[in-house]
Each structure stands twice: as C-alpha cells, then as structure tokens.
Image (spheres, rainbow, N blue to C red):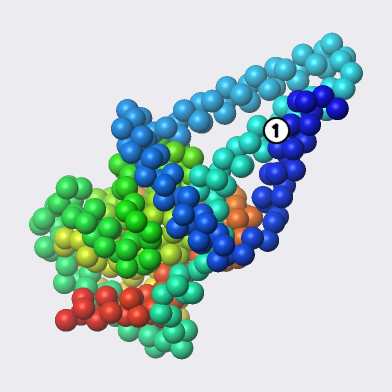
Amino acid sequence: MRFSTAAAVGLLAVAGAAAVAPIPPAAVERVYSTGAYPVFQRVLTPISNGAPFALIDLLIVAAAAWLIYFALAVRRLFRRGEKARVQRIVAWAVLPAAALYLAFLALWGFNYRRLPLEDKLAFDAAAVTPQAVRSLAAAAVSRANALHDVAHAAGWADEGMRLEAAFAAAARDAGASGTTVPGRPRRTLLDWYFRSAAVAGMTDPFFLETLVASDLLPFERPFVIAHEWSHLAGFADEGEANFVGWLTCVRGAAPAQYSGWLSLYAELIGGLSRRDRQEAAARLAAGPREDLRALADRLTRNVNPAISTAGWRVYDRYLKANRVEDGAASYARVVRLALGTELGRRVTAQQER
Ligand SMILES: [Zn+2]
C-alpha cells in the first residue's frame, strides 16, 4: 500500500467515523460548542468581515472549477482506456468531499450535536399549551400594532437598531460562551438561489460569515440578521436561532423590536387552528397587515415554486443528516422555547408592561 493510498483510506475512515459516531451531546457542548468553536469564530468572522466580498463565493467558484476539471479528467481517462480508472475517479470525487465534510464539522457542524437549549435553560414543558400559544400570538399582535408607526418613522438603517449590544446580551442570557463577533451582513453569489427559494439568509459554515438575501424588506432584515448571528454564536438549531434572534430584537430599538415580534407572529400562527389564526390576524392593525401583505407579494414575485420546494426538501434532509430530527420544521421550536423557558416568559412579561 503506497503512502497516498494509506492517507486516502485514513481520511475516509475518519470522515465516516465522524459522520456516524455517537458522541454524547454533553461532551460536544463542553469540548466543542463552548470550547473550540468560539475560538474559531473569533478568528474567522473578523477575517471574513474584512474581505471585500463574501468568502463563500470563492468556495463556490472553486467548486465549479473543480467540477469542470473533474468532468474533463474523467473523459480523458475513458478515452485512453486506462486501467484502474474506477479507483481514480472514486478517489478524485470522494476524497475532496470527505475533506470538505471534515472541515464543515470542525468549523461549524458539530454544533448540531450539542445539548438542546431546553436542557440548559430553566424549561417547563407544561407551560407550552394551546392556550399559551394563543395568548403569545395575541401579545405578538399587540406589540406589532404598538410598534409599527414608531419603527417605520425611525427608519431601518442598520446602525439605528442597537442590534449588536442587544445580541451580546441575548446570546449571554441563552448561555453562549464568551463574546461572539457579529458578521457583516453580505450579499453572495447564492443570492439568485436565496430569492427563488424563499431563503432569507444563511450562515456560511466555513468562513462563519452572515449572508442575507438582497430582496428582504427593510422590516425583515433586523430579525434575519439577528437569527444568523445566533448561528454564529453556536446555536445551530433553527428554532434556537429564531429564539435568540427574537430575544435580540426585542432588546433592540423600536424597528428591531417590530421585526422580532412580526417574525414570532409568523411562526406562532403556524401552530394555531384555522379559527384562532383568523382571529389573531383580524386583530392586526392596518400597518402590520400591510407589511405582511408586502412580504407575501415579495415571495409571490420572486419565488420559483419548483426551486423552493426542491431547495427546502434538500435542506430538510441536510438537517436530518445532521441529527436535527424535526428537519426544516425545527424553525417552529422557537414557540416552545419562548413559552417553556423562564427567559422567554420573562421577556414577554416585560414587553407587555
Ligand atoms: Zn437559520
């Protein structure tokens, strides 16, 4: 066995073991999510923040170039009728994929396997009742109604949101370790895909940068940015990122608060019966109702249903492969966290005063 073959087999074995090994969540939490990961984040995010473009775009261009090279090389092998071509093709295709997968896990992916927030915060499952969902929806409606005019009057410049200080406090309350460096919201080559698939934003798992769709309406942006920053803080689960994003927004200035409550409203009504949903919607004032209509219009205008369905199906599989049992449905876990945690109930109570 030549050295390169041994190295290749070793790489595959490590990647395979990393994919299936049952590592206890408490160990992931201690060693990775509150140990190594925050150190990587504090190094990588400032680097990508300083770059003139989204660094994931480099990776996309490199991947495209590699695919072309791969296709040409395979064609050459077949033309020459070389022996052992199958082994070589497999090595070319599988080894870079294994290396990329290991980089993904090391830089970000292990966060999917950490302890759930319910195990770390004071959590009472009995507080999550249909009645509690209805009253939180009513609170979201009344906050959105009360904040609409002042939020729109203040405007949506990122500087006016006080989002960074609010995020630092929210992440700390949710148990993030140390300081998280916020990512500069960026546009990427993936923008076309984001717009067609109704993806609002993404956290680049390699360079730990914050990517945001260019067609978001101004009132959507604060929550989307706060959600992506929560991923940067190591909250990989979509429901947890929604929760920390909401906690961030409600601590920010009025425009950020409005954005946070309107997003929570959208998650909440998904869990209501048809009648309760209609009742909650009927209580929305003209302003927020107009904003939600503009949001629906944006989606109708830009989303390609085939791309969106396929994209979300792939994302659902991706989450399940990363051991998120609920897959793409995990966004709604924010409702459970907002109602079941002491932290969530305290924030709602404070806001209603
Ligand atoms: Zn997310």
Residue 333: x %, y % from top left: 46, 70
Q: Vertical placement of 11 versus 230: above or below?
A: above
- At 46% from the left and 88% from the top, the residue drawn is 126
Q: Vertical placement of 134 versus 316: above or below?
A: below
Foreground residue among 222 and 137? 222
Residue 161: x %, y % from top left: 18, 54
Asked if residue 143 can be seen in this view, the reply is yes
Amino acid beneath label 1: Leu
Residue 327: x %, y % from top left: 57, 61
- At 57% from the left and 47% from the top, the residue drawn is 105
Asked if residue 327 can be seen in this view, the reply is no
Quick check: 191 left or right of 173? right
Q: Which corner quadrant holds the N terminus?
A: top right
Quick check: 49 left or right of 80? left
**Count of numbered labels shown in the rendering:** 1
Residue bearing the label numbered 1: 95
- At 61% from the left and 42% from the top, the residue drawn is 102
Foreground residue among 142 and 64? 64
- At 45% from the left and 31% from the top, the residue drawn is 57
Q: Residues within 10 Å of mark 1 (few under 14, many from 20)?
A: some
Quick check: 25 left or right of 345? right
Q: Vertical placement of 82 versus 314: above or below?
A: above
Foreground residue among 249 and 99? 99
Badge 1 residue CB within 8 Å of ligand 1: no
Callout 1 secondary element: helix
Q: Looking at the rendering, which quadrant does residue 317 occupy?
A: bottom right
Residue 33: x %, y % from top left: 48, 56
Q: Looking at the rendering, which quadrant does residue 274 occupy?
A: bottom left
Q: Which corner quadrant holds the C terminus?
A: bottom left
